[in-house]
Image: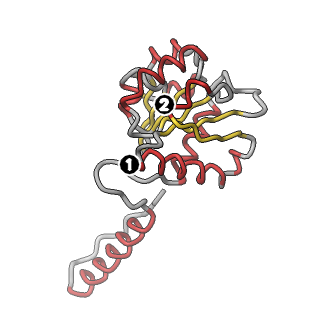
């Protein structure tokens, strides 16, 4: 988070203009270096803050509170390189987060999801919209929490929670999916999220 204070207004001279442009240049450079680099299209690469938001979200799930080891499955399409890259990137980011040390994290190809019986939380990578119906059915049968960084996943039946971090942090909850999968969140989390 960046903070700044306003300085007293000074008359504009060649010297003050040059000084202000210099300051603006440094601010712009700092902002650009702090922001993740966006890939082509609307799919940005994962950032460490995305992993932290995922971990923070799990802390508000009442179904998971008191569980010693949370089994997280990262679902991806092995035939889609972007989906597979996102899965590997998230696994790498979570491995470097101290809060994830008590978690069991596994990569689950979409064609193996039906036979996986260990994961209690599913992170759905982007590029899996064609499988949302299948994912929703499995999540319903096993009362699984499903999350994604693709808002369309929560807009459809695919996910309970989606979050976006491109312009601030936005969290979306599909209440129908939440009730269907029997997921219970703390009131504080429900208050901050946008309900779909």
Query: Which image quadrant: the C terminus?
Result: top left
Q: Measuring 51% from the left and 47% from the top, which residue is drawn there?
A: 50
Residue 104 x/y as whole percent: 71, 39
Closer to the chain start, of discs 1 and 2, is: 1
Relative vertical location of residue 81 with respect to residue 58 in this rendering, above or below: below
Question: Residue 34 sits in which quadrant?
Answer: bottom left
Q: Position of residue 112 (x, y in %)?
A: 56, 31
Q: Which residue is mark 2?
A: 192
Looking at the image, residue 57 sits to the left or right of residue 19; the answer is right
Residue 25 vertical position relative to residue 153 in the rendered view, above or below? below
Q: Is residue 113 left or right of residue 100?
A: left
Question: In percent of the image, x 75 and y 28: which residue is there?
Answer: 67
Question: At numbered mark 1, what does the secondary structure look like: helix, strand or loop?
Answer: loop
> What is the secondary structure assignment of the residue under circle 2?
helix
Tell me which residue sits at (51%, 12%) in the image: 180
The percent position of residue 15, horizontal first and vertical second, equals 26, 87
- Frontmost residue, 21 versus 109: 109
Dot 1 corresponds to which residue? Answer: 166
């Amino acid at each position: 988070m960046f903070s700044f204070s306003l300085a007293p207004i000074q008359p504009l001279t060649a010297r003050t203009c040059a000084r202000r442009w210099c300051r603006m240049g440094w601010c712009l450079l700092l902002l650009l270096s702090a922001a993740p680099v966006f890939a082509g299209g609307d799919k940005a690469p994962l950032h460490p803050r995305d992993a932290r938001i995922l971990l923070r979200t799990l802390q508000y799930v009442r179904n998971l509170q008191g569980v010693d080891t949370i089994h997280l499955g990262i679902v991806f399409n092995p035939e889609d390189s972007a989906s597979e890259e996102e899965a590997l990137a998230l696994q790498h980011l979570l491995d470097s987060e101290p809060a994830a040390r008590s978690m069991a994290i596994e990569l689950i190809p979409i064609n193996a999801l039906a036979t996986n019986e260990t994961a209690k939380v599913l992170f759905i990578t982007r590029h899996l919209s064609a499988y949302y119906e299948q994912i929703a059915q499995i999540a319903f049968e096993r009362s699984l929490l499903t999350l994604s960084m693709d808002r369309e996943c929560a807009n459809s039946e695919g996910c309970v929670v989606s979050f976006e971090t491109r312009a601030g942090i936005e969290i979306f909850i599909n209440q129908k999916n939440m009730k269907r999968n029997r997921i219970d969140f703390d009131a504080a989390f429900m208050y901050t999220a946008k309900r779909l």
